[in-house]
Image (cartoon, coloured by chain):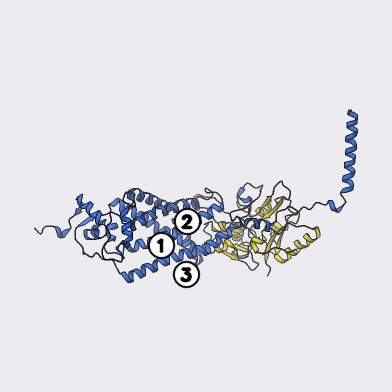
Chain colours: A yellow, B blue
Amino acid sequence: MARMKFLCDADRCIECNACVTACKNENDVPWGINRRRVVTINDGKPGERSISMACMHCTDAPCAAVCPVDCFYTTADAVVLHSKDLCIGCGYCFYACPFGAPQYPKVGNFGSRGKMDKCTFCAGGPEVDLSPAEFQKYGSNRLAEGKLPLCAEMCSTKSLLAGDGEIIAQIYKERVVKRGYGSGAWGWQTAYKETIAI
Amino acid sequence: MRLGAHIGLLVTGLLLTFAVAFAVPASAQQVNPTADAVREQQFLDVLKGNREAELQGRVSIPDQRAATLERPAGRDWRQFHQGTMLWIAAVSVLGMLLILTAFYLIRGRIRTEAGPAGSTLTRFNAFERFMHWLTAACFIILALSGLNVTFGKLVLLPLIGPQAFTNLSVVAKWSHNFLAWPFMLGVVMMFVVWIKDNIPNALDVRWLAAGGGIFTKGHPPARRFNAGQKVVFWSVVLGGAALSVSGFYLLFPFYAGGVLNLQFWNVVHGIVSVLMVALMLGHIYIGSIGMEGAFDAMGSGEVDLNWAKAHHSLWVEEEIEKGQVNPGPRLQPAE
């Protein structure tokens, strides 16, 4: 089985935000939630880079570790998913996540945040694959259709890569060698405790 | 003059054009765009000295909280919550239960040596008992629902299954959110009503030096509250304040600032609450099975004169002066 990962080649990202829009559309993401976002660091300064970030589907995911009701599970493809039926909206995953991935429909008083929502790697949830219930709660299940996450699939500069970790690392490595520079696989050190050696 | 300046500019311009035209193809002039781009490892290295930092950028979506690219502090909080917190809770709560069991087995129930006198004294009036039980009932539910957040998945989840455990946890969460308010009200009332009897003084030093009379025959003198009870009072007031402030920030996210502040208040809330649970176990023990006659104080509000003389000798003297002793049935004339 593959070990699914995201990799954003920051040297190619043009901050067009198409991944953000595509994700919202494909998964019918509720208003106010962005499962994916593009963050520009060193904005307007030399060395400025834009990085498209979402849930990184961490190895030994902190969200899953701290969840008081154990609603997280990891698929055979190493995608970190959760059950909205079990989630109690306590906010612990969101305290623990290094990437700010878990979000809630409401920033409510009395902790009435609603069920947590985050990137599913376009892999749906615990419901029957491609069922209406699955789509309604988690959005699209492109993995079940043999496709990769839409954000990466439609990235115009192919900056955002999604797929088996070894394959996307190889693609990135070849790019860096060919062009002679690379600002690294953002988030990998934090999410997977490894980076891509060039 | 003007013409000369124009010719000068033209020449300079031409020279620059040539310079650029010939210089660009040279590979030495190629810009290296990665030279000063931040890499994740650099960021993490900087963070080693400052675990509080977050990597902030700019986002074009309205949610400005999304501008935080990485916040590795989440890992530390997870480490605390899944490691240190479990240990603090287990050691303090189970440790207290162990101490109380051992104490019960060795010392047994503390009896009133003089036996019951029959006549009674009013120790707590109806309002005092109301505010005590209001706080106590809220505290017990708050403690159980709070412990459920940390220990529920280890203890209850395997027993009752995921869906039932979620339903229970939702109820627990809502009870925790709502009962926090009567709890806070109770703490404030107890603070106002009882502070006058809880100011530490020289008697407390003697009481503590005598070990509260737990292991000795005689009882050190005490007014309405002895030093042990004053410790409970101040722990409830100060601990209750800490729980209220931290709980308030957790209840209303982002009033206190960002996620790092929420992590901080969560740590405060967790540590203070398990220490309070441990203390309250001791309080419940000594107020019920641990000591004969103690429960009456908060039950009916009336305590036996001999119990009061043993534990609060100076308070009894004050009350007798005020003529507050209720003669019991045995003191009634036989007629």
Q: Position of residue A133 (x, y in %)?
A: 59, 60
Is residue B206 visible in the rendered image? The answer is yes
Q: In what element is the residue under mark 1?
A: helix
Label 3 CA crowd tier, 10 Å (few <14, some 14–19, many 20+)? few
Q: In what element is the residue under mark 3?
A: helix
The reply to the same-chain question for discs 3 and 1 is yes
Distance CA(mark 2)–CA(mark 1): 14 Å
* Amino acid at the residue labelled 2: His
Closer to the N terminus: mark 3 or mark 1? 3
Pointer 1 chain: B
Q: Which residue does the numbered mark 3 point to in the structure image? A: B159
Distance CA(mark 3)–CA(mark 1): 25 Å
Q: Which of B93 and B7 is in front in this view?
A: B7
Report the mark closest to the observer, 3 or 1. Answer: 1
Say above or below: A43 vs B308. above
Quarter of the image containing the C terminus of chain B? bottom left
